Amino acid sequence: MKIVPKTNRRLFLGTLALFGVLGGARAADEVVLHNQIVRPGTTTQMVVGVNLEQDYVSFQMDLVLPEGLSVPANSEGLPDVQLMDGWARDHVFDCSYLSANVVRVACFTFTNAALASSSGPLLHVKLAAASDFAGDATLSLENVRFATSKAKETKCETVAAKVITVPQKSLQLQLANNWNWVSQNTENTRDLSVFISPVGELLQRLLSDTQELVRDSKYGIVGNLTGLEPQKGYRMQLSAEQDYASPEGAWCFSDDYPLTLHKGWNWIGYLPFSAMTVTDAMANLKASENDRIVGQEKFADYKDGQWTGTLTVMKPGTAYQYKSGADVTFCYPTSYPAVEPVAESRLKTAAPWSCDAHLYADVMTMIVQTDIVDSEGMPLLVAAFCGDECRGISQAVQNMQFLTVHGTVAAGETIHFVAYDAETGSQYLMDGQMVFDGGAYGQISEPLMLHVATDVATAIKGLVKPVVSMSVSGNRLYLSGQIAAVSLFSANGMILRRLDAVPQNGVDLSSYPSGVYAVALTMTDGSTIVRKFLR
């Protein structure tokens, strides 16, 4: 990337206005500017993004600021605006003050080289808020123009964004029975007692990557975890589902809490107070090729400047694992979208299995392909099993299957794989097994190939037992499958109850205290399946 000499800047700013035919912006050409949060008397970074349909070689835009906001000067006396990595080829980038509240940004090339990307974060703009800035203001991007190599200029509509000061927020979550990956983003919930107060007696365990709390039958909550950090992720085990709402407190200003990622795995929190796409949330991070961000059910990989996978949206109160290729520090954006993005729900499939993502604390992620394909040449859906229990079902992304497998790393469980062809209903046992270790396998450029062993109808008999569905809701245990009889046991093996059939309205647990239990299920084929559950 080249910088325009000061003597040429005025000439350059006039050059962009001499482009040829002016056309209206196509439907897909847009500039993305989120609402911004600032703290009076400090600076913060604002991100400007774009989604472009054509290959453009140059652009220009004017940032119009409200009173009390400014773009401070860099060491060269110019507005502190930077073109994000991955955009410039043989391009010149420039910015200038047109007036006290207007900054012009422009980028062009002498060789007609197209910009190296077409979507995602484009600019980093440093904003400074005066000490008396009261918020509730508007900034805008005006005179936004992009030009092609054929001198055709496209003008985009003016984009405006709200600017507010640090707000008061309540963290609200829908927590499932058993394990939830959680984080916090208000100053008051850094206090452990404040954070766990909404769940009360339902809390069984709370884990960080190095510390934990656990409920003891005699002493209550004990452990070495004494406080929470907004940058970190945690895993919370509950004895029942819960609508969680924390007391209202000041939002943790993202710039005050940088995240330091070490090479390898990191447990991270999510500081923004609204949902954002993975691309927007990670706009300030210089990710390495094949970095992986993992949620409790979905994940995404970074490849060729883009995040690809089943994880598309990050949400407040949620924790993630991040596998980094390098030591790096970044801050989440101090911005929020006017309309929160909605994460795509898991697509319903015709697969004859189901998986509860909350039964276990840990996950293992895999990008896979199968050596057998459907009629359209696409890899088959893949399910992971531990014995008879389904631990994960893949989702198709492009020509790959993204598979999140659930389990317990410390248990050293053995996982095997089954492929399913929805068109024919055929199931295929795949060669090989893996130890559940919480790792990341396969890459977008090199998926892990799974090879068919034989048709499951004959080969998997005795390896995968009949499918059982089990869930706890309120004071009842719900079971489904080819079950002939049920035996309920305490954690120490004492038999509590026997049933010759599965009640349609579930097994009543109201007379038993909270804790760990087990059921032995006698199946109609004579086999026995034993499962543990938390009441």
Image (tube, grey):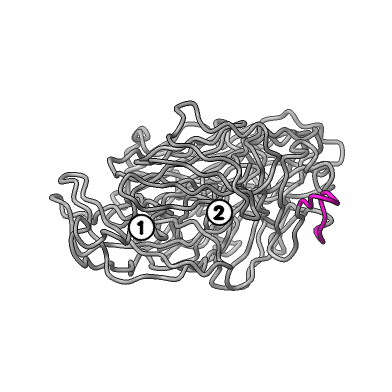
Q: Where residue 196 sits in the image (x, y, percent)? A: 78, 43
Crowdedness of circle 1 by 10 Å Cα count: few (<14), some, many (20+)?
A: many
Q: In the image, is residue 437 part of the stretch drawn in magenta?
A: no
Vertical position of residue 292 compared to residue 332: above or below: below
Vertical position of residue 204 compared to residue 241: above or below: below
Mark 1 or 2 closer to N-term?
Answer: 1
Given residues 155 and 479, the one toward you in this image is 479
Given residues 161 and 293, the one toward you in this image is 293
Residue 267 falls left or right of residue 522: right
* Residue 425: mark: none
Look at the image and give the residue range highlighted in magenta: 215-225
Look at the image and tell me whether residue 160 can be seen. no
Tell me the residue that label 2 is attached to: 360
* Residue 114: mark: 1
**Disc 2 residue type?**
Tyr
The residue positioned farthest toward the top in the image shown: 505
Query: Residue at the spot x=50%, y=54% of the render?
Result: 12
Given residues 264 and 20, the one toward you in this image is 264
Quadrant of residue 373 in the image? bottom left
Query: Residue at the spot x=72%, y=64% of the render?
Result: 75
